[in-house]
Amino acid sequence: MGSRRKARESAMQLLYQYDFTQQPMDELFRTYWQHMREDVDEDVRRYATRLVQGTFDHMDEIDQRIAEHATHWRLPRMASVDRNVLRIAVYEMLYEAETPKVVVIDEAIEIARRYSTYEATQFINGLLDAIRHELEGASPPATRSTGTDG
């Protein structure tokens, strides 16, 4: 697994941990790097930290974009893993221009495949592809909803 994938996985795990603990960022990073992922190199830590901080700094905009495309789903009702995979990917598509959007989507799907469900990978793929089309100014392909949040 490449260092960028490890960083993205770590970023998802950090945001997942934040969802449940609401720890201050410095404490969150310290706890995670000292006790959960002490085995990763500095490049992974640096990129994961950049992803988490950037996602956190732009959370309102990111969540709004996700909500606009998540037909019949509200963010609080999404599984925390899925929500945070989406957040990181949207952050990367908006603010990490050196990574092609299709690569960001593929990486998000692979992380969801490892940590979530098959249905989630389809949902994440469709939602991120719609956001990609919007950002590129193209019309998204017709999509269908994968469920409702009741």
Image (cartoon, grey):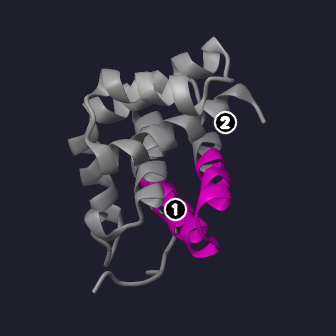
The x and y percentages for residue 113 are 66, 60
Dominant secondary-structure state across the stretch colored magenta: helix
**Label 1: element kind:** helix
Tag in front: 2 or 1: 2
Write down the region rendered in magenta: 106-133
Name which residue lies at 29% across and 63% down.
75
The x and y percentages for residue 100 are 60, 35
User: 94 above or below 98?
Assistant: below
Residue type at mark 1 is: Ile
- Per the image, the residue denoted by label 1 is 124
Is there any visible trace of residue 39 in the rendered image? yes
- Looking at the image, residue 80 sits to the left or right of residue 19; the answer is right
- Looking at the image, residue 13 sits to the left or right of residue 135; the answer is right
Q: In which quarter of the image is residue 17?
A: top left
Residue type at mark 2 is: Arg
> Looking at the image, which residue sits at the far right?
1
- Looking at the image, residue 83 sits to the left or right of residue 110; the answer is left
**The label number, if any, that marks residue 5 in the structure image:** 2
